Image (cartoon, rainbow, N blue to C red):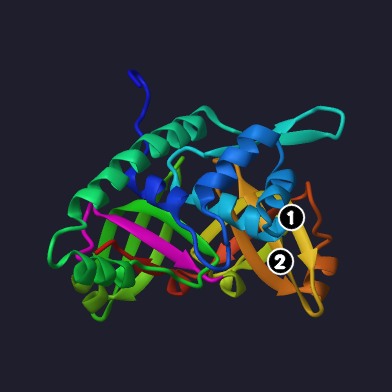
Amino acid sequence: MKGQEAPHPSVMRLVAESDGRRGKGRIELLEKIAELGSISAAAKALGLSYKSAWEAVDAMNNLAATPLVARVSGGRRGGSTALTPFGLQALSAFRRLEGEYQRFLEALQGREDFERFFGLMRKLDMKTSARNEFLGRVKTVKRGAVNAEVVLDIGNNLALVAIITNESVDNLGLALGVEAYALIKAPWVIVTSAASPVRTSARNTLCGIVTRCQTGAVNGEVVIELESGKSIAAIITNESIENLQLKEGVRACALIKASHIILAVSA
């Protein structure tokens, strides 16, 4: 892979994750997208819901420095979905690493404490209910009397500002250059029209194109894709979706208060 950027370990971990809700590993989802050229077709082939497949793709794109999956415009049906060159590279690298990992596990099976400590490691692996998860590096830490302002660079000239306690800064070991995750629950995201003249106190504004807008009984989910290929999901009322005239293809902005961003680091 000379001359190409190697996939980040966090990308490889995220690609490999699977759980009971998804039912299939994300690596299989990437393979099916590459094979079928469609997320809906890939989801159907793997027995996943369309929504679960899109959420998995959004999560992988958000945590990767370069998107793994991209929409391709044109075609008889108006477009398709394909793996980016980086996505194909990550897929190939994962399959090679998977083989090495299996050989590693087989070599450890006879060790006395393997099962006990391997089980503990699995329990400590973090999973969250936050719909939005971004990976970045700490750009600045500005301490106050009680709280601190932490700016996290998530790539592509995007940054998120979080307000957390000084104690949390110390506990997480946050300092310039430290890698950290930003977790944002979808109901905490405020959506506005991109052309709205309203000014707010929210420190974070992420603008892009609405790619999914699905209403439910009372609330709906709106997903905004940013220019970087990352995306952010919001849960807002159906009434708000109607008032803002939100639909696929329109520009919109996601507003997030700094106090609504949770920071986390890998153990």
Q: Which three-letter amino acid code belongs to the residue tagged 2?
A: Glu
How far across and how far down the image is residue 168, in percent? 26, 75
Residue with the most extreme front position: 110
Q: Which mark is residue 91?
A: none
Would you call the spot at circle 2 few (<14 residues within 10 Å), some (14-19), or many (20 or more)? some
Real-space Cα separation, disc 1 to disc 2, in angstroms:
8 Å
How far across and how far down the image is residue 210, in percent? 72, 52
Among the two numbered marks 1 and 2 on one chain, the one whose residue lies closer to the N terminus: 1
Q: Which mark is residue 221?
A: 2
Q: Within the magenta stretch, is there residue 174? A: yes
Classify the position of the C terminus by image quarter. Answer: bottom left
- The residue depicted at 47 percent of the width and 73 percent of the height is 260
- The residue depicted at 78 percent of the width and 49 percent of the height is 250
Q: Is residue 198 visible to us here?
A: no
Q: Which mark is residue 212?
A: 1
Q: Which three-letter amino acid code belongs to the residue tagged 1?
A: Arg
Q: Quadrant of residue 31?
A: top right
- The residue depicted at 79 percent of the width and 28 percent of the height is 74
Q: Is residue 237 visible to us here?
A: yes
Q: Quadrant of residue 8?
A: top left
Tell me: 165 left or right of 214. Answer: left
Q: Secondary structure at mark 1?
A: strand
Would you call the spot at circle 1 few (<14 residues within 10 Å), some (14-19), or many (20 or more)? some
Q: Give the magenta part as a residue range.
A: 173-185
Q: Within the magenta stretch, is there residue 47? A: no
Classify the position of the N terminus by image quarter. Answer: top left
* In front of the other: 266 or 41: 41
Q: Pointers 1 and 2 in contact (CB under 8 A)?
A: yes
Q: Secondary structure at mark 2?
A: strand
- The residue depicted at 19 percent of the width and 54 percent of the height is 108
